[in-house]
Each structure stands twice: as structure tokens, then as C-alpha cells.
Amino acid sequence: MDGIRPVPGFPGFSATFDGRIIGIRGYPLRPHGKHTRNDKVRYYVVHLRDEDGKYRTVTWHRAISSAWLGFVLRVIWLIIRMGILLIIM
């Protein structure tokens, strides 16, 4: 297992196995503060440039997990989405 993988959907950005995000220029990024969800939980966020050149605010842990578990998470998401569609139909 190598120690670095690209973050899907954000070309030039990579995530390391120990939880760092490497920017386009090759330097580690720092989180841009915390984002609040449900007025209780606060997540570290980072601003990444997507394939269209637009900056997106992404939670730090989702960027790391999408790089390391990206394919698995996409398959699970498709299964859940198809299951919801089958329940609705």
C-alpha cells in the first residue's frame, strides 16, 4: 500500500495515509477552520479546486476518506441510491 493517493474530483490534490492533504504545488495544506453541523459537531474544512476550476469547501475527513475509500464509497452510495429508488417505485 503506497502512502499517497489522489483526491477524486479534485485534480492535483492528494491525501496521505496519515491524514494530510497535499496541494497542487506539493505542499501540505492546513484546514481553514471548522464548519458547524447541527450546532454541536464541528468539522475541519479545506477549500479545494474541482475539475471545473471552482473552489469547493470539503470537510477534511471526507477528502481523506474519498481518496482512500473512494471507489468503495461510490459503490455503496450507488447501492443505497438504487435501493431508495426501488423503494419509491
Image (spheres, rainbow, N blue to C red):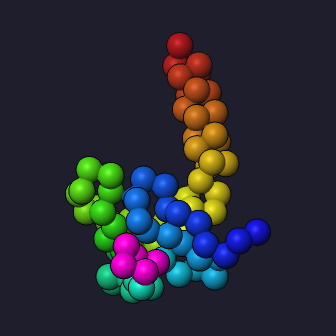
Query: Residue drawn at (59%, 76%), measured in percent from left and top?
Result: 16
Q: Is residue 77 magenta?
A: no
Asked where in the image residue 26 lies, by quadrant, the reply is bottom left
The number of numbered badges drawn on the structure is 0
Q: Residue furthest front?
A: 25
Farthest right residue in view: 1
Q: Is residue 11 visible in this depiction of the protein?
A: yes
Q: Which residues are magenta?
A: 22-26
Pick the quarter of the image with the N terminus: bottom right
- Asked if residue 25 lies in the magenta stretch, the reply is yes
Residue extending furthest toward the left: 54
- Of residues 83 and 23, the one nearer the viewer is 23
Q: Residue at x 48, y 77 (%)?
A: 21
Q: Is residue 6 above or below residue 52?
A: below
Residue 25 location (% of width, % of height): 36, 79
Residue at the image point whose x is 25% and y is 63% from the top:
55
**Is 61 displayed left or right of 43 in the figure?**
right
Q: Main secondary structure of the magenta part?
A: loop
Residue found 63% across the figure and 82% down from its top:
18
On the image, the x and y values in percent for residue 60 come to 46, 73
Query: In this rendering, is residue 38 above or below 31?
Result: above
Name above or below for residue 6 compared with residue 44: above
State the image coordinates of residue 15 (x, y, percent, origin top left): 54, 72
Where residue 43 appears, as percent x and y from the top left, is 44, 75
Residue 67 placement: quadrant? bottom right
Left or right: where does residue 80 sit relative to residue 88?
right
Q: Nearer the viewer, residue 36 or 6?
A: 6
The answer to whether residue 65 is visible is no
Viewer-proximal residue, 40 or 81? 81
